[in-house]
Image (cartoon, rainbow, N blue to C red):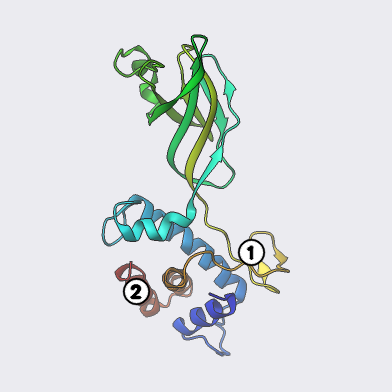
Amino acid sequence: MLNSTILIKAKERLNKLDSQDYDNIECWQIVEAFNKGQVEWCRRQLVGTNLLKQGDEQSRRRVDDLQILLVTAPAVISNKKTYYEFALAADYFQYKRISAKASTPACTAGRPLVIYQAEEVNVPLLLRDENKKPSFDWGETFSTLVGNTARIYTNGDFTLNSAEMMYYRQPILIQVDGCVNPYTNLVSTVNVESEFKDDIVELLIDEAVKILAGDIESINQKQISEQNAEKNN
């Protein structure tokens, strides 16, 4: 959907189309509300706090709506003796899975690992548990997230040759040519349109209108937009 269409639809929902009163909405306000709204919408769909209580991949609709944000990136790993560590991507939004390939002196060809996500508080217990500690023979280990880094535990028993992470990235922020970018305070010189399908953009417009209506204390528009954004998910 074109950015010009988003601006028109947002103003129309707020009853501010061609309005000359003091409550005129500027384009940068719509841009900021739309970008904020798409982050809030994505979080609700991913964790299942939407109307249908469906998280990511719990229905065909969730898979279809969110697959555009799902990416895989190779990891630059560093050996920390008991674990390997790599930094999360700058656009990281939510964890999906980690894959890795490991080897030992007796098996230089290597093998893929099944990696479970674990809580950092349980690491000492997991490393001592014979059934859950890292095992090259069983091809299993666990990982944790700490300080914007991911850790893949080996207990020093094997070597990681490579790793990659699948994750949900942050949605791309829209920009409107000639409109002040609220994140840089500079006038945008390009149009960056929403990456989502038009039917999702319609929901994101409702999200933006809900935010703007709350800012200008327009309760009716806020309630209508909030209901529309949820019942159409």
Left or right of 38, for residue 118: left
In the image, 83: left or right of 181? left
Q: Is residue 50 left or right of residue 149?
A: left
Mark 2 → mark 1, Cα distance in angstroms: 26 Å
Of badges 2 and 1, the one in the foreground is 2
Viewer-nearest residue: 11 or 48: 48
Q: Quadrant of residue 22?
A: bottom right
- Give the label on residue 69, or none: none
* In the depicted structure, whether residue 205 falls above or below residue 158: below
Q: Which mark is residue 182?
A: 1
Amino acid at pointer 1: Pro
Q: Position of residue 128 (x, y in %)?
A: 34, 12
At 44% from the left edge and 82% from the top edge, which residue is drawn?
Answer: 13
Q: How many marks?
A: 2
Residue 17 point in image, percent of width and height? 53, 88
Which sits earlier in the primary sequence, circle 2 or circle 1?
1
Q: Are marks 2 and 1 in contact (CB under 8 Å)?
A: no
Residue plotted at (49% across, 78% down): 10
Q: Which residue is mark 2?
A: 228
| Amino acid bearing label 2 | Asn
Q: Choose top left, top right, bottom left or bottom right for residue 31.
A: bottom right
Name the secondary structure under disc 2. helix
* Quadrant location, the C terminus: bottom left
The residue drawn where x is 34% and y is 51% is 57
Q: Could you say where residue 191 lies in the image, as x and y percent from the top left? A: 66, 70
